[in-house]
Image: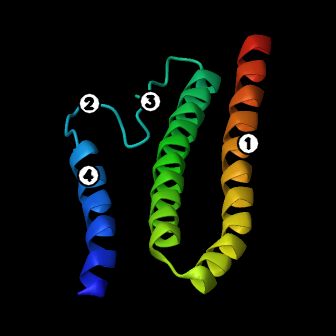
Amino acid sequence: MKKVIKILPILMVVLMIMMTCAPVLATTGKDIAGVKIDPKTNSANQVAGIGNNILGIIRVVGTVIAVGVLMVVGIKYMMGSAEEKAEYKKTMLPYIIGAVILFAAVNIADYIVGIANSIA
């Protein structure tokens, strides 16, 4: 019974995430990266568009994963014993460092792309 009580909140959180992230299927006639390749246009704009799309995807996926992992670890921390709480505290430092690196890297790359677009 205790296992069910521990698993149930995690299952509910996963189901809530799945329900709020409903997939949207649409087509716009563009290629996979989301930028229509036209040989008459400037290739630098095409590359910048593809780069912006990739940064956006990384930002969204990274945020969803980071928040999901934080929720799971937080629920485990609340439900755990004193020894398990000490173990979760040890795992939180690498998680926080990884999340900061992820968000910083995406924002720095976005800033560099913005500077490059303003120069060109």
Q: What residue type is labelled 3?
A: Ile
Q: On the image, numbered disc 1 is attached to which residue? A: 104
Label 2, label 4: how many angstroms apart (C-alpha)?
A: 32 Å
Label 4, label 1: how many angstroms apart (C-alpha)?
A: 28 Å
- Position above or below: 87 against 92: below
Looking at the rendered image, the disc whose residue lies closer to the viewer, 4 or 1, is 4
Q: Which of marks 1 and 3 is nearer the N terminus?
A: 3
Q: Element under label 4? A: helix
Q: Tag 1: Cα neighbours inside 10 Å, few (<14), some, or many (≥20)?
A: few
Q: Earlier in the sequence, mark 1 or mark 2?
A: 2
Q: Which of marks 3 and 4 is nearer the N terminus?
A: 4
Q: On the image, numbered disc 3 is attached to which residue? A: 37
Image mark for residue 16: 4
Quarter residue 98 falls in: bottom right
Label 1, label 3: how many angstroms apart (C-alpha)?
A: 30 Å
Looking at the rendered image, the disc whose residue lies closer to the viewer, 1 or 2, is 1
Residue 15, how many percent across, how many down?
23, 58
Looking at the rendered image, the disc whose residue lies closer to the viewer, 1 or 3, is 1
Q: Which amino acid does label 2 sit on?
A: Gly
Looking at this view, is 43 or 57 the one in front?
57
Q: Which residue is drawn at 60% across and 76% down?
A: 85
Label 2, label 3: how many angstroms apart (C-alpha)?
A: 11 Å
Q: Element under label 1? A: helix
Q: Tell me if label 4 and label 1 are in contact, CB under 8 Å.
A: no
Q: Residue at x 21, y 39 (%)?
A: 24
Q: On the image, numbered disc 2 is attached to which residue? A: 29
Looking at the rendered image, the disc whose residue lies closer to the viewer, 2 or 4, is 4
